[in-house]
Amino acid sequence: MSETREDQASVNPTGDPAGAPAVVFLSGDLMFASRVRAAAEAEGLEFQLAASLPDRGDIGYVIVDLATRSGVVEGLMDRCRQVCPGAKVLAYGPHVQVARLDKAKQAGIPVVVTRGQFDRSLGNLFGGDD
């Protein structure tokens, strides 16, 4: 069956089907980003590595690496409410960086975990109905 004009209209500019949420990973850790990308793509999600929250309406997940991007925490939830109000927002960081974890919680990020907890949950993070 060939693609119709209506089918083409339901494709966003990145070429992904409309409604397929994106995972935005705010991090500077390229090695760990490849693991997050693999988990996202395994669930059919688009992945974007960024330094700050991009302007795009298809964001389903925002993940903040507090070890490399703790500076984006301030005001992040306000920005998410504007850009991607339905997105699930999560921050993680090293267990020894308690101040960064606390700062993320104080900023209103709903899920703040240690890197070890995040790493262990990565395999099913995007697949469940949470």
Image: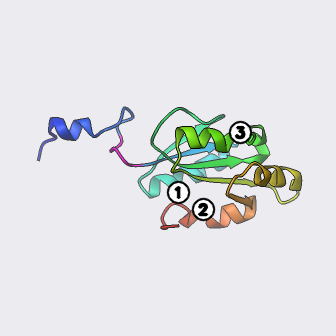
Residue at the image position 68 percent from the left and 41 percent from the top: 76
Q: CA distance from mark 1 to mark 3?
A: 27 Å
Q: Is residue 94 above or below residue 22?
A: below
> Hey, what amino acid is under mark 2?
Leu
Mark yes or no: residue 31 visible.
yes
Query: Where in the figure is residue 89, as x and y percent of width and height?
Result: 62, 52
Image position of 110 (left or right of 58): right
Q: Are marks 1 and 3 in contact (CB under 8 Å)?
A: no
Q: Is residue 113 above or below residue 91?
A: below
* Other residues around mark 1 within 10 Å, as few (<14) / some (14–19) / many (≥20): many
Q: In the image, which is nearer the foreground, mark 2 or mark 3?
A: 3
Residue at the image position 53 percent from the left and 67 percent from the top: 130
Which residue carries the number 1 mark?
39
Query: Where in the figure is residue 10, as x and y percent of width and height?
Result: 27, 40
Report the magenta stretch's main SS.
loop
Residue at the image position 53 percent from the left and 50 percent from the top: 87
Mark 3: which secondary structure? Answer: loop
Which residue carries the number 3 mark?
75
> For the magenta stretch, what is the residue range?
16-20
> Hey, what amino acid is under mark 3?
Gly
Q: Are marks 2 and 1 in contact (CB under 8 Å)?
A: yes
Q: CA distance from mark 2 to mark 3?
A: 25 Å
Query: Where in the figure is residue 2, as x and y percent of width and height?
Result: 12, 42
Mark 1: which secondary structure? Answer: helix
Which residue carries the number 2 mark?
122
